[in-house]
Amino acid sequence: MSLVILGEDVDNLALKSIAKLTASRAIEQITPRSFRLVGAQPHDLLSARCAEAALDFAWVPEGRRLADFGLFVTDMDSTLINIECIDEIADMQGLKPQVAEITEAAMRGEIDFRESLTRRVALLAGLREDALGEVYEQRLQLNPGAERLMQGLRRAGLRTMLVSGGFTYFTERLQQRLGFDHAHSNLLEVSDGKLTGRVIGDIVDGEAKAAHLVRVRDALGLQPQQVIAAGDGANDMPMLRAAGFGVAYRAKPVLRAAAQCCLDHRGLDGILDLFA
């Protein structure tokens, strides 16, 4: 395994300190913001030392390249984009604190996702449908590196999928905007131009996310180790476990433990540098 260090601004002294800590034989520059520590050995203080220097790290199989993968799967809310859409929709009703509290509990794994989504969506009953457009146009932004990541994945020949416990209004637009091959999420019921407070069809929860990953992976004839998955909360746990390489982006502790890489400082395009 190779130890890859990456960050927005990699301090040379901090990098040398980490190389010494891990008994690395050499430092190889991969890109201007990523480095490979040759012959590095695990150390209990590695995580803390990287955190102090605002650096991310990952142990990557020797010689592994992006083209060795065939599928990339990502969560939407707080992973691909900067907001939790349902929280911002609730803000239109003056209910953001109540909904956000349920969202946070679900992301930490304290509440079953299906139960949490049903409770949150029920609070949106009566909201006009065009409020969704206001959230998309005025509040939603891509997280740093998202566009560069998607461009790099396409160049390497990977298929891409967006899976979300959020809503089709947003995933459909992001699919078109960024060129995802597949997208799956929940459909809000609308009547007379207003949300009814219900979801149509089966709820896309953590297990459904993993099932979509496995279905597409098998259809492409890929092995688990040829899949990269990215997420931020407990609802993404089954998906990361079904992938060969899991990325926790600005993630809750419950997901960090299941990931091969935690991106706390670099943007999403840091994934490209891991396999350059």
Image (cartoon, rainbow, N blue to C red):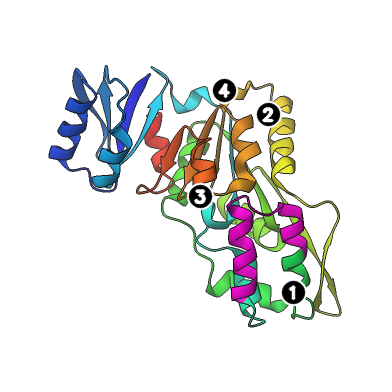
What number is the disc on residue 205? none
Percent from the top left, x then y, of residue 61?
A: 42, 20
In the rendered image, which residue does mark 3 sit on? 252
Q: At 59% across and 53% down in the image, what residue appears? A: 107
Q: Nearer the viewer, residue 179 or 257?
A: 257
Left of 19 or right of it: where is 166?
Answer: right
Secondary structure mainly formed by the magenta segment:
helix
Task: Determine whether the residue tagged by mark 3 lies in a helix, strand or loop.
Answer: loop
- Contact flag, marks 4 and 2 (Cβ < 8 Å): no
Q: At 54% across and 42% down in the image, what residue appears? A: 255
Above-or-below relation of 145 to 4? below
What number is the disc on residue 225? 4
Q: What amino acid type is highlighted by mark number 2?
A: Arg
Task: Determine whether the residue tagged by mark 2 lies in a helix, strand or loop.
Answer: helix
In the rendered image, which residue does mark 1 sit on? 123
Question: Could you classify mark 3 by the number of other residues whose Cα lies within 10 Å: few (under 14), some (14-19), or many (20 or more)?
Answer: some
Left of 250 or right of it: where is 201?
Answer: right
- Contact flag, marks 3 and 1 (Cβ < 8 Å): no
- Contact flag, marks 2 and 1 (Cβ < 8 Å): no
Magenta stretch, residue numbers: 96-118
State the CA–CA distance, disc 3 to disc 1. Answer: 25 Å
Question: Could you classify mark 2 by the number of other residues whose Cα lies within 10 Å: few (under 14), some (14-19), or many (20 or more)?
Answer: many
